[in-house]
Image (spheres, grey):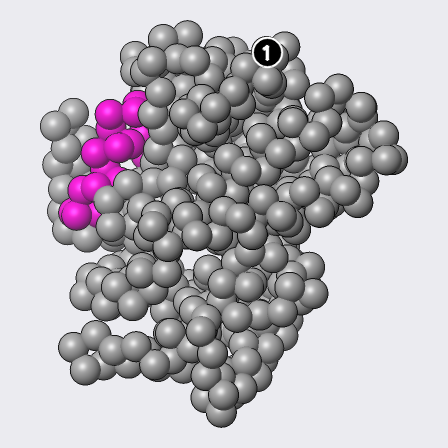
Amino acid sequence: MSDAFRLTTDTRRAEAAPREPAFYRDPYAFYDAVHAASPTFFWDNYGHWCFTGFKDVNALLRDKRFGRQILHLMSREQLGMPPPKAHTAAFDQTEKYSLLTLEPPSHTRLRSLVNRAFVSRNVEQLRPRIERLANELVDGFEADGRVELLRSYAVPIPAIVIAEMIGMPSDMAMQLVDWSNRMVAMYMHGVTHETELDANQASIEFMDYVRTLIDERRRAPREDLLTHMLTSEVDGEKLTEDEVISTTILLLNAGHEATVHTTGNAVKSILESGLDPQALFADDKQTEATVEECLRFDAPLHMFTRYALQDVTLENGLSFKQGETIGLMLGAANRDPSRFAHANRFDPFRNDGQNVSFGAGIHFCIGAPLARIELQVSLKTLFTRLPGLKLAQPPEYKNIYHFHGLERLELAW
């Protein structure tokens, strides 16, 4: 069928190597094939069933019979999992209390303590700060006539904003990004021993830094999210220091990673579409629609996994035993031809726009309102300030399938 993948229709099995350039540079060809042949299929490279239909993915993200955590219900031995690796103990510690992996009631308690900072009415107050920051960054490279956009613009905006929200100095933002990038490499398919060691070292350094800040806030509280996490209570309970550290690292990692990828992917999509950027950002309503289409068309995260928390039989007849993994393919769901007219067309004026790029259900991205504002402001500012923007080199995607983003984005004007 393709050099990048193989799909056997009668058995609903697929082979597609996530680290092969032909695949990760264009996973959409694979998605087109599975949508046409078998939207639910067994991915041999991962060893589990995957779902690509928009309706299925949206429903399963909300299905409480599936969750992000399983070791609270089953042992490693029952699951056939190897024991924890000693050389990734620090990385594992950062994940232990992550909102991304916890299930209720722990998830409910932790999220309720953090959620207030990220509701729309609160993050909307950050819009003027984001606008100033975006314009300052463009001021820094406008006269050059060209820029590598990710490092100079896409990365600093969300990194600085989330750092300042938590209560970290903005000049630490790029160090935080370095730690984050080294840790996120752990989510690649086929992680090497060297990557594990480096991610663990980054985790040690990141945790040490957060502990230093926690000590400072206990001595001198401030009006920031870190102080809020240290002092707030739910039902008389406060977060433990380990929970605060895990949550802080998650917010910093998740608070910039997906937004950076979406910014790069969005600029690429807009420039390759040939559409007039002035029309795409003509007013607030159209700017919002353009951002939502960017999120749909080239999502920053392509697969989330879930464990069956109990024995489950779905309406389509597939059965899963407790502890089995399923893959929910967000990038594929966003291109489902049964849900979207001309699903492979970038169309910010479509009237059937929707996406699952932020997930759904109890694990819906807590930072979605902030990410949307950052994208609305940064994209509009960029195309308004630099009306002659064009691609200076063909962009290429990073070799990280799950986190779908560009390696570099060279632009000129």
Note whether 271 is above or below 145 in the view shown: above
Quadrant the C terminus occupies: top right
Magenta range: 48-66
Extreme residue in the top direction: 342
Residue under pointer 1: 275
Say if the magenta span includes residue 61.
yes
Callout 1 secondary element: loop
Whether 341 is among the magenta residues is no
Q: Residue at x 58, y 80 (%)?
A: 208
Q: Is residue 96 left or right of residue 396?
A: left
Q: Which residue is drawn at 44% across and 74% down?
A: 223
The answer to whether residue 240 is above or below residue 308 is below
State which quadrant residue 333 falls in: top left
Q: Which residue corresponds to the image point at 70% horizontal and 30% vertical from the top-left?
A: 385
Left or right: residue 135 compared with residue 1: right
Q: 246 and 85: which one is in front?
A: 246
Residue 389 point in image, percent of width and height:
73, 22
Residue sitting at x 50%, y 15%: 346
Q: Can residue 32 be seen in this view?
A: no
Q: Where is residue 7 in the image (x, y as percent from the top left)?
A: 44, 18
Q: Nearer the viewer, residue 109 or 166?
A: 166
Disc 1 packing (10 Å; few <14; some 14–19; many ≥20): some
Query: Which amino acid does the dot numbered 1 rest on?
Result: Leu
Please, is residue 281 above or below residue 63 in the view?
above
On screen, residue 143 versus residue 355, left or right, reads: right
Res 133 visible: yes
